Every structure is written in structure tokens, then in C-alpha cells.
Amino acid sequence: MRTLIAAVAASYFTCAAADNALIVPPMAGKVGDPGVWIVLPGAEINKDVYEPMAKSVQKACAFPLWVTVLGTYLTPTPIPPEIGPRIDYILKTMQSQGLDLSKVKLFYGGHSLGSVFIQDHLKSYHGSTGPMGGKIQVLGQVLMGGFIQRKYVYPAWDYPVSTLTVGGELDGLARATRLAEAFFQAKSVSSDFPVVILPGVTHMQFASGDPPLLVKARDLQPEVTLEEAHVAIARVVAPYFEKLAGVSANWQQLASAQAETQEFVKPIIEAYQLEGARYMGTPVQFGGPGQSQCVVGKDKGACPSKSPWAPMAQMEISNGIDDWKLSVSNEFVQLSSTPLNGGAFHLPEITNDTSTRTISISTYSENYWDDAQPSWFAWKEIFDSYDTGFIATSALEIGTKLASRQCTYILGAGKVDTSFDVDAPNFCAQTNEKAYAWAKEKAQATSKARFEKFGQKFTFKDDIPKEGGPLWLYARLQFNDMGEEVEVASPMQKTEKDYWKNHFGPIPRPSSIPDPGCYHYCKLLSPARAIEWIYLDSLRAKLGLHVSTVQNATIYV
């Protein structure tokens, strides 16, 4: 099949007068074996607008570097069947222009959608199956406004060629939170996969010129000039090439950029781990890549993992009991699981130990990511499966089954006369405010200052009562855009201790139905969603690339 594709593609390009590619010869005065960087452009981005960035990298590189950007014909960016034949064609073209193929150091690259296609191509065709019939080794690649795809990370790291990931702090398409995930994963592998996030740089600044419609609609305003962005890119790309080529003149520049990136992503990673993020440390949950490892049998619908944040809501609900300690456990489950659908009920339980005066409460959570409308068509989860970083990677909500304050007091502390009125406060909103406050406190200083000046702020409204489990289960945490602010409201369900008696009177409760009393369920704001909002999505209204004027001298349009 590969031979057939290659033959067809080669025939196509042979018929053309020349391949549609930008070729930038190396700068004069460079010595040493030549390098070649072959780049795939982003969707609908013309090859020629990458020339200024290419020249910045050439200038910074210690050896003579050729750069070529493969242009497009009928598709938005070069696609897999044509990439291999076109690379061979371009190498031969550069050979005719003076490139010594016997000494060449070859690197690949891709921007945006091009970063997806080039890494797929390199994964399949390297070493003996690489360019020129395997005669030339590809030393590494640079992904710009992109990252190693999750399919090469889970269930285990499976990418064979060194890769540098370079992203922009203000990239509105390949968001910084997805780049933080890439940093988190690559750091556990080896130094062959460095990840760098450049301050103030946006998605379009890896190129130049007018952005295509999608980029204009979703990218943010840059905080550095185009020239400054290209210099910043060159300061990490050139040392990466030099290291792989055996020339380490400026290696410290890349190491320093990685250290700065580590500090930048630290609060992001911490927030995602507090959530119990499916791609940042907690894959074994429903909707996560390790879902198949969740328990079956009598505990079907449960997973051996948890949300570290969810117990905060129970602490909020159950605090204020004199002389008693509170111990709260959590487990990820499928909240809709019941014996009727082949699973098991997962309901909060309250126990106590009078000898240590400890009240123990079990809670159960499920992360939910898709906030697409209409809700019956989960297009955002479908989009996320393509792994572009285009949509939020944090959970929309942490749905959590919690025990009521009334029953904490009665069953835990033995205060049998406690009224259900103690569950009147908006405990869900109070917990969500804590998640927001945590994110603002932890956010990196520059990101926080930018958010305070330009970002839409969260405000928290009263909890929204739901009567019945399914009504609460399928109601989502609300984010209502009010202009300057976004109102956050949590669906909530609470039941008193004597719920069955009060609602069903003398009808005896069947043994197959668990006691429906003692609950206080919440849809929780994830600290990760809060920090992702602060770093990126809150900025779109005032700092989106589509916004024509920005009243800030540090913003460059």
C-alpha cells in the first residue's frame, strides 16, 4: 500500500514544474555539516509567511541550516499520503542547489495541524523506512503550536524520535494547559522530549501575515512583537538542533527556557492533579484512557482512583462539630450506576469511632468534560478525541455525592435533634468559591495580573435545587456569560434523614431500594477549570485576536 501511495504521489509531483515549497538556503558565513529543517504549515496558512521565523532560526543556528516549508495544493495542509514523496523530492531539489546529502543533519517540524501530520509521518517512517529509502536519518522534530499526541502517551509512551515541543503562553488554539499536560508527560520520559512555553507568544506568531479565519476567531492578542517572538523561538529551536547534531554551543538557552516553563506550568499541573485529571495522573476513571481498569462485579461502576478536591465539599458541609475529627474518602465511580443497569449503587456513608472521636464519610465523584450545546450531542468530547488543544482540557465539573450536614451531626456526632435546616446554606457554591480562590492564589504572577486586568471574573450564585437523582445527575454546572462576569451556579440535591417517611408516608421501603435520606449532592467547580479560565478562556472577550482595540501598551496587535 505504501509503495502504491508513493508511486501515485511521486507521479503527481513529477508532473508539476516544481513542488509547491518554500526553500530558504542557509545564511552565508556558517560552517560545518549542513542541516535541513522540513516544516509542515498550519491549516490554511501560506508557506511563505514562515520565512521570517525560518530566518531567525537560521541566524541563531551554529551550522548552515536549510529550511523548507511544504506548501499546499487542494488540502489545508500537506496530508500523510503526500508527505514522504514530497520530502524526497525537496531533498533532491536542494541537492541540485548545493546541499550535500551525504553529510546532512535532517530535522522535521510542523505548526498547528501540520504538527499532527508530521509526527504521525515520522512515527511510521524513520530509520530504515525514512527519507530517501532510509538513507538519511531524521534526528528530531519541532512541534510548534502542537504537541505529542495522547495516542503516543497512553497506555505507555510510544514515540521513537526526539521531539521539541514549543508553544505560546497566549496560544488560543493549542492552549497552554494542554502544553502543560505535554510537559507533565514528557518530563517522566527523558530529556529527548523537551517542552517549552514562550511568554507572551500566540498561535499565529510561529508564522506571520494575516491569520486564517479560525485562527483570527480563536487566537489571543500577543504581548511581544512578531520579531521578538521569532527570536524567542530561535533561542530554543537552534540549541535543540545543535544538541542533536553534536554541537552544544547554546544548549543552556534551551535548558533555561525549560526551567522557566517548569515554573509556569507548576500551578497548572497542581490544579489538574487536585481535580484528578484523566490525562495528568488519574487515567483510571470513567471517561479516562484507563477506564477499562475500573472495577467490575459487585462493585461495577467504581474505579481505584479519586478526586483529591471533592472531599473539600464534604469538609465544607460537615465542619463545626466540636471535639470530632472528620475523615473523608473519595472514589471515582459512574454516578449513574445502579443494579438496574448492571452496576451498583454508590452512596455516601457515615460511620464514627467514638474511641478516637473520628467521623468517617465516604464520597463518590465523576468528572464530566463536555459542555457542548445541545447537550445530547457531545461534540466537544468528539473534538477532544482529535487532541488539538482547541477546547478546554479540564473537567467541566466534578459531580459528587456527599452526605448531608444534618446526618453528619446525627449519625456521626450523635446530635439526634439536629434539624434539616442546617443544610440550608449554599454549600456547593461555597466550595466552588474556594476552588476559584485557590486558583487565583496559585496562578503564576503574570497570568494573574493579566486576568485581573482583562479577564471575565467568576461570580457564584445560589445552588440550584433538583428533586430526584436523575435530574441532578444530568444537570450541569452552569456558566452564564453576563458580559464583565460569568455567573457560576451548581445543581444540588439534598435530602433529610427521614426522607422516605416524609415523602412516602406509611409505604414501607423495599429492601432493594437504599435509604434515600442523608444526601447533599453537588456539581463542583474543578480547580483545574478555574485555573484554565484564569490563564486563557477568560481573556477571549477583551484580548481575543478578533478584538480590534486593546487599551494596554504591552499588547501588540
Image (cartoon, rainbow, N blue to C red):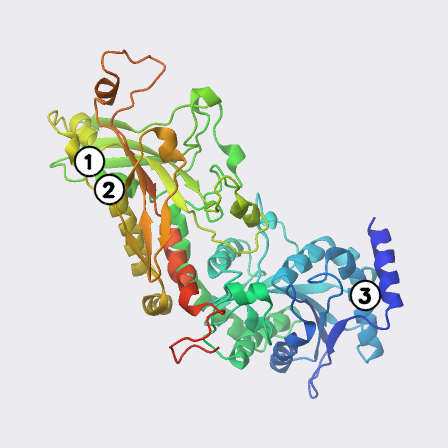
- At label 3, which amino acid type do we have? Asp
Residue 72 lies in quadrant: bottom right
Q: Tell me the element at label 2.
A: helix
- Numbered badge on residue 423: 1
Residue 169 on image: x %, y % = 47, 67
Residue 162 on image: x %, y % = 63, 61
Outermost residue on the bottom side: it is 29
Residue 309 lies in quadrant: top left
Residue tagged 2: 427
- At label 2, which amino acid type do we have? Phe
- At label 1, which amino acid type do we have? Asp
Q: Tell me the element at label 1.
A: helix
Front position among marks 2 and 3:
2
Disc 1 to disc 2, C-alpha distance: 8 Å
In the depicted view, which residue is nearer to us: 451 or 94? Answer: 451
Q: In this view, does 170 lie above or below 491?
A: below
Q: In this view, does 255 lie above or below 365?
A: below
Question: Which of marks 3 and 2 precedes in the sequence?
Answer: 3
Question: Which of marks 3 and 1 precedes in the sequence?
Answer: 3
- Give the crowd class for mark 3: few <14, some 14-19, many >=20 residues within 10 Å: some
Residue tagged 3: 88
Horizontal side of 447 relative to 170 (left or right) equals left
The residue under the point 31% across, 51% down is 435
The residue under the point 77% across, 73% down is 103
Horizontal side of 283 relative to 490 (left or right) equals right
Asked if marks 1 and 2 touch (Cβ < 8 Å), the reply is yes
Residue 195 on image: x %, y % = 53, 63
The residue under the point 63% across, 75% down is 247
Residue 535 on image: x %, y % = 40, 62
Residue 526 visible in the displayed image: no
The residue under the point 81% across, 65% down is 88
